[in-house]
Image: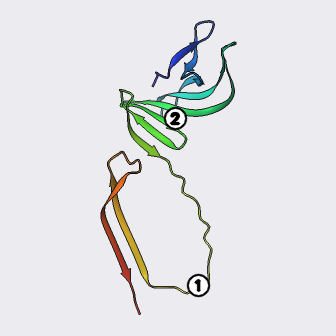
Amino acid sequence: MDNYGEPVLSKDNNLIGYKLNDYEYAPVETLYNGNNLLSNKILIKDFNSENLSFVGEVLISCIDTKTEFGFIRELDNFRYFYDLNNEIFNVEVIYNQPKFPIYKLDTNLNDKIGTIDLETYGSNLGLGHHEVFYSCCGICCQK
């Protein structure tokens, strides 16, 4: 959680951020979140090497939260879970369900019902590669 790259020090030898690669720098703000867990707020910004300051708009923002098993990185709508060896072991996606408007329609009810159900499992932490292990379908037709 505290290994972001090469430390960037001020003229007074204080840590002001990290050099992630040749083009990205990040100031890191340490704080405690609402659950009183130690967290780092990382803001990837442009860096002015002449006066040792971060400039411009935030390009990417994420929050790392220390846990007993490692840390959690929250980036966009994803939560990446890392173990104590900084290896990722789980990913969660926060879904925003669209709100569909409900309209009252004057229609004739149709009592013919059809359904299909596919049960799947994935072996790669749920990252989109799933296989169907059970399927069921049914139809009801009444006259």
Depth check: 13 or 25 in front? 25
Which residue in the protein does label 1 denote?
107
Give the vertical position of 112 relative to 59 (above or below). Answer: below
Q: Which callout, 1 or 2, points at the residue further toward the start of the chain?
A: 2
Which residue in the rendered view is the most extreme toward the front? 22
| Image coordinates for residue 133, horizontal then vertical, percent | 29, 61
Quarter of the rendering occupied by the N terminus = top left
* Residue 103 as seen in the image, left or right of residue 91: right
Q: Quadrant of residue 12?
A: top right
Q: Quadrant of residue 119?
A: bottom left
Query: Looking at the image, which residue is at 45% across and 85% down?
Result: 111
Q: Amino acid at mark 2?
A: Gly
| Image coordinates for residue 138, horizontal then vertical, percent | 35, 77
* Residue 18 as seen in the image, left or right of residue 118: right
Which residue in the protein does label 2 denote?
34
* Residue 41 as seen in the image, left or right of residue 143: right
| Image coordinates for residue 60, horizontal then vertical, percent | 59, 33
